[in-house]
Image: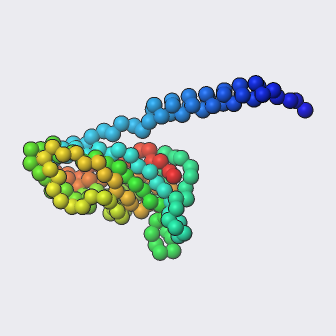
């Protein structure tokens, strides 16, 4: 059996730690893609990020643990016994009013489309309440939606007075 000296163990551990730190800092430097503001009739809406977590019947803890980005068939999604999807999608958005007057805003203007031509889903929860968005103000907030266990081709739509805007969810973090 080969014996390792204390120096060899420490050197090997330091090399592993340095590699891990470099990998972590390189991935962190890349970070999520920059939010691209989508023009609206009053300013812009930006998709800041999205992540899916599983729901459980016991204590509501997250159940999914793998990271993924991409699409699977929406039709393959199974419904829980109470006929709701088992996943919970949290979407982070920024809404900017670039006008010199307040505009009416409601979180209900956001809807989630599941699949290319699938159903749209209303937000389950949000921290915002309907009301006026003050002139020159930008609000960062989150919305949650129920989604299939394997979310597919998700897109967030925003109902503006001029048109319905679509913000594709290209990379969804799975927790």
Q: Residue furthest right?
A: 1
The quarter of the image holding the N terminus is top right
Seen from the viewer's position, the closer of residues 19 and 66 is 19
**What residue is drawn where x is 34% and y is 62%?**
125
Residue 152 versus residue 28 in the image, above or below: below
Q: In the figure, is residue 57 to the left or right of 14?
A: left
**What residue is drawn where x is 45% and y is 48%?**
172
Location of residue 145 in the rendering, given as x and y in whole percent from the top left corner: 38, 60
Location of residue 36 in the rendering, given as x and y in whole percent from the top left corner: 30, 38
**What residue is drawn where x is 23% and y is 55%?**
159
Seen from the viewer's position, the closer of residues 83 and 30 is 30
Please give the count of numbered marks on the rendered protein. Answer: 0
Q: In the figure, is residue 2 to the left or right of 121?
A: right
Location of residue 101 in the rendering, given as x and y in whole percent from the top left corner: 9, 48
Residue 161 in view, yes or no = no
Seen from the viewer's position, the closer of residues 115 and 93 is 93
Residue 170 in view, yes or no = yes
Location of residue 18 in the rendering, given as x and y in whole percent from the top left corner: 61, 28
């Amino acid at each position: 059996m080969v014996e390792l000296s204390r120096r060899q163990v420490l050197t090997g551990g330091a090399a592993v730690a340095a590699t891990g730190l470099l990998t972590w800092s390189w991935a962190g430097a890349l970070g999520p893609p920059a939010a691209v503001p989508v023009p609206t009739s009053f300013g812009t809406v930006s998709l800041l990020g999205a992540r899916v977590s599983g729901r459980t019947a016991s204590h509501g803890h997250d159940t999914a643990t793998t990271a993924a980005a991409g699409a699977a068939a929406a039709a393959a999604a199974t419904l829980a016994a109470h006929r709701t999807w088992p996943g919970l999608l949290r979407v982070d958005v920024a809404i900017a009013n670039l006008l010199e007057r307040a505009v009416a805003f409601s979180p209900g203007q956001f809807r989630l489309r599941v699949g290319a031509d699938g159903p749209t889903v209303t937000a389950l929860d949000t921290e915002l309440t309907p009301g006026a968005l003050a002139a020159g103000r930008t609000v960062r907030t989150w919305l949650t939606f129920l989604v299939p266990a394997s979310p597919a081709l998700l897109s967030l739509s925003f109902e503006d007075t001029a048109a319905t805007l679509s913000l594709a969810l290209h990379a969804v973090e799975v927790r």
